Amino acid sequence: MTRQVLTVPFAADLLAHVAGELLAALPGAADGDLADALVLLPSARACRDLEHRLLERSGREALLLPRLLTDTQWADELAAGLGLDDDDLPDDRIRPLLLARRLAGGQLV
């Protein structure tokens, strides 16, 4: 899987920029297939809005959309894939402290 991080100028419209990049960069975009992409956005609303932008900019009747997730949704999916749930995960406020202690002690697991 190829990863690409988009840098969006501060004054630019984030969703319009991302929609344009996806439609230009993905090999299946000409056929309306964007399903090979995973897009992480800051909110669920941004995910829904990007869906509409993609459809508008493509000029097509229908599209196969990319996976559009927030960073929290993505982290939850990864945790579930590892067999973890919210009860097993430390609170967000103390995660950096736990990680720092593990790194200092040479423990990565």
Image (spheres, rainbow, N blue to C red):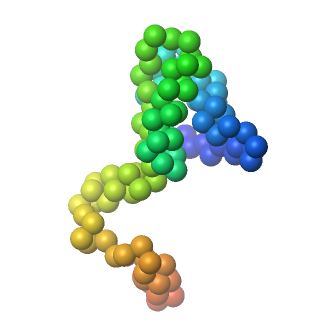
Along the line of sight, the residue nearer the viewer: 83 or 22: 22
From the top left corner, tell me how far across and down residue 40 is, in percent. 50, 46
Q: Quadrant of residue 12?
A: top right
From the top left corner, tell me how far across and down residue 36 is, in percent. 46, 31
Quick check: 66 above or below 14? above
Q: Quadrant of the C terminus?
A: bottom left
Along the line of sight, the residue nearer the viewer: 48 or 74: 48
Quick check: 90 above or below 35? below
Residue drawn at (34%, 56%) of the image = 76
Q: Is residue 55 left or right of residue 79?
A: right
Along the line of sight, the residue nearer the viewer: 82 or 14: 14
Q: How many marks?
A: 0
Residue drawn at (60%, 42%) of the image = 4
From the top left corner, tell me how far across and down residue 23 is, in percent. 59, 24
Residue drawn at (40%, 51%) of the image = 74
From the top left corner, tell me how far across and down residue 77 is, in percent. 33, 52
Whether residue 25 is visible, yes or no, is no
Q: Quadrant of residue 57?
A: top right
Residue drawn at (41%, 56%) of the image = 72
Quick check: 87 above or below 21? below
Whether residue 101 is visible, yes or no, is yes
Along the line of sight, the residue nearer the viewer: 89 or 47: 47
